[in-house]
Image (spheres, rainbow, N blue to C red):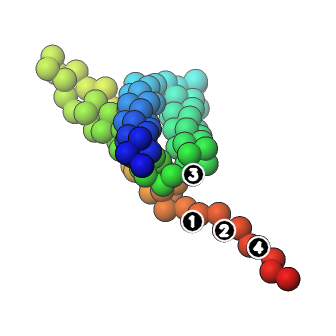
Amino acid sequence: MRSLRLARLGTWLIAFIVGAVYGLAGTIAHTYMLGWFPLGLTLAIIGCAAFLAAVRLLTMDRWAALSTGLGMMLATLVFSGTGPGGSVIVPETSAGIVWTITVPLLVAVVVAWPERVRVTRES
């Protein structure tokens, strides 16, 4: 029983760290534009949504998905502020606002998504 708890805590910790890496990558890449198309923002949103969904579906654990999302949100929050040299990674542009709002929305949708219910047929 104790090893099961440690395994779940380890899963949540790893999910948090990898979520933070995804959040950091999305925060850095979201400003990339290909002409008029916001390619970085699009890929960052798709990548984070796919990773959140994968964690939720593969672990069958709402808490692991929440831990992943918290890592993403924390990385976005930390790197959205002004750095020590005065540099800003997430400028106050439409892409920056969309990225900052989309990450918590993705986390809320994936974590709140209902469990799959298996209907058994009784004879």
Q: Which of labels 4 and 3 is toward the front?
A: 4
**Is residue 75 positioned above or below 62 on the image?**
above
SS class of the residue under badge 3?
A: loop
Whether the residues at callouts 2 and 1 have beta carbons within 8 Å, the answer is yes
Report how far apart the C-alphas of labels 2 and 3 lie in the structure. Answer: 12 Å
Residue that lies at the very extreme toward the left in this rendered image:
84
Q: Which of labels 2 and 1 is toward the front?
A: 2
N-terminal of the two: label 4 or label 3? 3
**Quick check: can you spot residue 104?**
yes
Residue that lies at the very extreme toward the right in this rendered image:
123
Task: Specify the label residue 117 is tagged with.
Answer: 2
Indicate the quadrant where residue 39 lies: top right
N-terminal of the two: label 2 or label 3? 3
Of residues 33 and 120, the one drawn nearer to the viewer in this rendering:
120
Task: Specify the label residue 88 is tagged with.
Answer: none
**Which residue position is annotated with label 4?**
120
- Tell me the crowding category of disc 2: few under 14, some 14 to 19, or many 20 or more residues within 10 angstroms, Cα based: few
- Tell me the crowding category of disc 1: few under 14, some 14 to 19, or many 20 or more residues within 10 angstroms, Cα based: few
Of residues 100 and 53, the one drawn nearer to the viewer in this rendering:
53
Task: Specify the label residue 60 is tagged with.
Answer: 3
**Which residue position is annotated with label 1?**
114
- Say which amino acid is labelled 2: Val
N-terminal of the two: label 3 or label 1? 3
SS class of the residue under badge 2?
A: loop
Report how far apart the C-alphas of labels 4 and 3 lie in the structure. Answer: 19 Å
Q: Position of residue 98 (x, y in %)?
A: 43, 45
Q: Which of labels 4 and 1 is toward the front?
A: 4
SS class of the residue under badge 4?
A: loop
Identify the residue at image location x=25%, y=33%. Answer: 78
